[in-house]
Image (cartoon, rainbow, N blue to C red):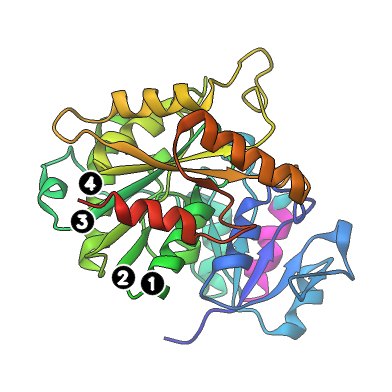
Amino acid sequence: MSEKRYLILAEGRSDDPHYGKTARGVLSYGEQPVVAILDSARAGETSNGIPIVATVNDALCFGPTTALVGVATQGGRFPPEWRELLRSCIAKGLDVENGLHEFVSEDEELASLAARHSVELRDLRKPPPDLNVPTGENLGLDTTIVLTVGSDCAIGKMTVSLELDRAARARGLASRFVPTGQTGIAIAGWGIAVDAVVSDFLAGAAEQLVVEGYRRGGTDLLMVEGQGSIVHPAYSGVTVGLLHGSAPHLFVLCHLAGTTEVEGYPGHPLPSLPELVELHERLSLPVRPARVACVALNTRLLDEAGAREAIRLAEAETGLPADDPVRFGANRLLDAVVQNRL
């Protein structure tokens, strides 16, 4: 199979840390090369050394094979103006990989156009058809399952899992990143987007992912990408299903330093870090009580001095090791995970 060469579609969102997180994640961690980014608002600039273009035609000289939808929209729907963008990609012979809840492969017009141009439409969030409830198979795996959990959505749970996985592999540990969302799937090339699974089968999907990660070589550590937050007024359901289905031994608690409310929900305060530690440990399965091993802070809103002070305060509050694995490296957090392995 020939190598994919991505054109990331990030119209208006390529520099957005929240709604552009798919683009940013693939740029930072993806295994397939990105040759161009489409965002007419920033055309002529570069991101991570990758040229930013205004149109699909402008990108063709870089030789892309696949257009990847690089944005996460509210509700997972395409903005109306994106329809022409998708048509253009298909007409130019590009496969389309889409992580939104709106499936391009089920759109009659786009599917017909894709058939005429012999291109493939891949919906990363479409769950497999054979899901069921958990069987308990994950409870018998000889590995340590680590789930990233968080105070809010879009604060870096996937990034922390990837950084810990990289650091573990660098130490010679048999570690695997377990993708549970569309961006993780685009990065790793496999996985299930658990937020698109029927709720009865969500825990079963999480179990299936853990078992698959073990089969793919995660015999020392499985770094499971977290989703949502147990205190989020909209997305807590997927968090709990993933937590119980993956049956982790350990949690890594993630938090965006300096935030006090759920983003987008004014008046919904975030619990303190010690409260979040207690909530997650109490919510774990009675058959496998899990504990929080460490705290991963996202300090992007702070300067370096502020970041180090936030880390110090998090450690003082929780009595747990804390760090920002992107800013200062993942080794300290990995030490805490390894020391707590069963």
Tell me residue 186's x, y (percent): 49, 62
Q: Residue at x 41, y 86 (%)?
A: 1
Determine contact: label 4, label 3, CB under 8 Å.
Answer: yes
Res 329 quadrant in image: bottom right
SS for dot 1: helix
SS for dot 4: helix
Residues at marks 2 and 3, CA–CA distance in whole angstroms:
18 Å
As shown in the figure, which amino acid type bears the numbered disc 1? Arg
Residues at marks 3 and 1, CA–CA distance in whole angstroms:
19 Å
As shown in the figure, which amino acid type bears the numbered disc 4? Glu
Check disc 2 and report the residue beneath it: 173
SS for dot 3: helix
Residues at marks 4 and 2, CA–CA distance in whole angstroms:
22 Å
On whether residue 7 falls in the magenta region, the answer is no
Res 299 quadrant in image: top right
As shown in the figure, which amino acid type bears the numbered disc 2? Leu
- Left or right of 214, for residue 105: right
Point out the stretch of residues depicted in magenta. 83-93
Q: Residue at x 78, y 47 (%)?
A: 303
Relative to residue 23, is residue 79 depicted above or below? Answer: above
- Left or right of 139, for residue 340: right
Q: For the residue carrying disc 1, how many other residues have a C-alpha within 10 Å: few (<14), some (14-19), or many (20+)?
A: some
Tell me residue 244's x, y (percent): 26, 34
Q: Earlier in the sequence, mark 3 or mark 1?
A: 1
Q: For the residue carrying disc 2, how many other residues have a C-alpha within 10 Å: few (<14), some (14-19), or many (20+)?
A: some
Relative to residue 215, is residue 261 depicted above or below? Answer: above
Residues at marks 1 and 2, CA–CA distance in whole angstroms:
5 Å
Relative to residue 203, is residue 108 depicted above or below? Answer: below
Q: Earlier in the sequence, mark 4 or mark 1?
A: 1
